[in-house]
């Protein structure tokens, strides 16, 4: 992989992290597609010809309006950019309910990718990974064996984590029900769950980010929230830097966002906005002029991260039904 003057973490030789932000009001190949490619170039993320790139959108579930998933046109733009660089591209996720193929069909991603010759796959075939904290988790072989990931999250709020952005989207590389098991085993036990997500992100191959914030989801999440016209697209070589930029843009206090707080506790440089470089627009450019984050509602009271045994059992049954039920 090549990342211009940046290393695998997205850090430039000058010790700063580039985050390219721009406005985009509507989805479409001619509008958002062009902006996405330009932002990835500005951020310095460019895969080497012949490299294997896993494009990792958020394919949470087959919700009719698709708001809980990354918009198909942004995913298509990510795929087109990587293909234009000569990469070998696969699109994959491990949805909360159902298969990636089924969710992609339901939200319009399958149609959006027609003609590109890429597959949508469910991230299964787990590899047991031991993280630095000693926690273990089953990570999809396809994610671990890729030369690089292109992480394509949607800006959403989250009833357990307040915001779900780039770092949290990489939790989708954990296979199937193992995500629910991680909630049950490590949730609400100090910072164990946050540590798992942060260390998982560090364990994965180098990850570029293309952020979908044209229509965000607010009030509640990761599903069932309301659309919010944020009008934002972003790109970076660092998932942490992207989360810091968006959290700053939305006016969130770092200590109130569990993953951001964990990253700062670990003194990750990209978790501090003073270490970021904005070559296009900065978070301050989104307020007060143009589209602003004013009115974007982040949950104030969080639900427990841990799933009780009965909740875990219901989750297992729902996962099986969505993947193998009569309409699958």
Image (cartoon, helix red, strand yellow):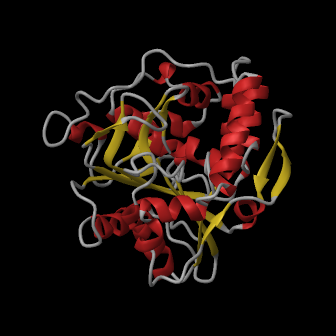
Residue 259 or 65: which is nearer the viewer?
65
Residue 182 visible somewhere in the drawing: yes
Task: Please state if 254 lies on the left or on the right of 146 as rendered.
Answer: left
Q: Quadrant of the C terminus?
A: bottom right
Residue 145 at what x, y percent from top left?
75, 66
Residue 129 at what x, y percent from top left?
84, 48
Query: Splitting the image into 4 quarters, where does residue 180 fall?
Result: top right
Q: Is residue 300 above or below residue 227?
A: above
Task: Please state if 301 lies on the left or on the right of 172 as rendered.
Answer: left
Direction left: furthest residue: 289
Q: Residue at x 36, y 62 (%)?
A: 39
Task: Please state if 117 lies on the left or on the right of 77 as rendered.
Answer: right
Number of marks present in the image shown: 0
Direction front: furthest residue: 326
Q: Is residue 246 above or below residue 25?
A: above
Residue 199 visible somewhere in the drawing: no
Residue 104 at what x, y percent from top left?
51, 63
Q: Is residue 65 above or below residue 161?
A: below
Q: Residue at x 28, y 61 (%)?
A: 27
Residue 122 or 169: which is nearer the viewer?
122
Q: Residue at x 41, y 33 (%)?
A: 247
Q: Residue at x 86, y 34 (%)?
A: 134
Residue 8 or 259: which is nearer the viewer?
259
Q: Quadrant of the N terminus?
A: bottom right
Residue 87 at what x, y percent from top left?
57, 79
């Amino acid at each position: 992989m090549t990342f211009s003057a940046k290393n695998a973490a997205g850090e430039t030789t000058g010790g700063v992290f580039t985050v390219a932000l721009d406005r985009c009001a509507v989805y479409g190949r001619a509008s958002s597609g062009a902006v996405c490619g330009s932002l990835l170039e500005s951020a310095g993320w460019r895969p080497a010809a012949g490299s294997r790139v896993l494009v990792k959108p958020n394919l949470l579930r087959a919700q009719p309006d698709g708001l809980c998933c990354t918009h198909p046109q942004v995913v298509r733009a990510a795929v087109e950019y990587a293909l234009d660089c000569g990469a070998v591209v696969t699109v994959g996720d491990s949805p909360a309910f159902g298969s990636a193929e089924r969710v992609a069909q339901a939200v319009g991603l399958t149609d959006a990718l027609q003609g590109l010759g890429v597959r949508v796959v469910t991230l299964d075939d787990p590899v047991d990974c031991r993280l630095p904290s000693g926690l273990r988790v089953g990570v999809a072989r396809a994610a671990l064996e890729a030369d690089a990931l292109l992480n394509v999250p949607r800006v959403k709020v989250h009833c357990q984590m307040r915001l779900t952005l780039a770092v949290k989207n990489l939790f989708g590389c954990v296979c199937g029900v193992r995500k629910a098991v991680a909630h049950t085993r490590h949730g609400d036990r100090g910072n164990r769950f946050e540590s798992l997500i942060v260390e998982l992100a560090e364990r994965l191959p180098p990850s570029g980010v293309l952020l979908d914030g044209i229509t965000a989801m607010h009030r509640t999440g990761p599903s069932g929230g309301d659309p919010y016209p944020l009008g934002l697209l972003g790109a970076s070589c660092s998932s942490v830097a992207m989360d810091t930029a968006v959290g700053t843009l939305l006016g969130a206090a770092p200590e109130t966002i569990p993953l951001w707080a964990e990253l700062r506790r670990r003194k990750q440089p990209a978790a501090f906005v003073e270490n970021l470089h904005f070559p296009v627009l900065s978070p301050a450019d989104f307020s007060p002029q143009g589209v602003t984050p004013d009115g974007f509602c982040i949950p104030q009271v969080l639900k427990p991260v841990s799933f009780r045994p009965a909740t875990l059992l219901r989750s297992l049954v729902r996962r099986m039904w969505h993947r193998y039920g009569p309409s699958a």
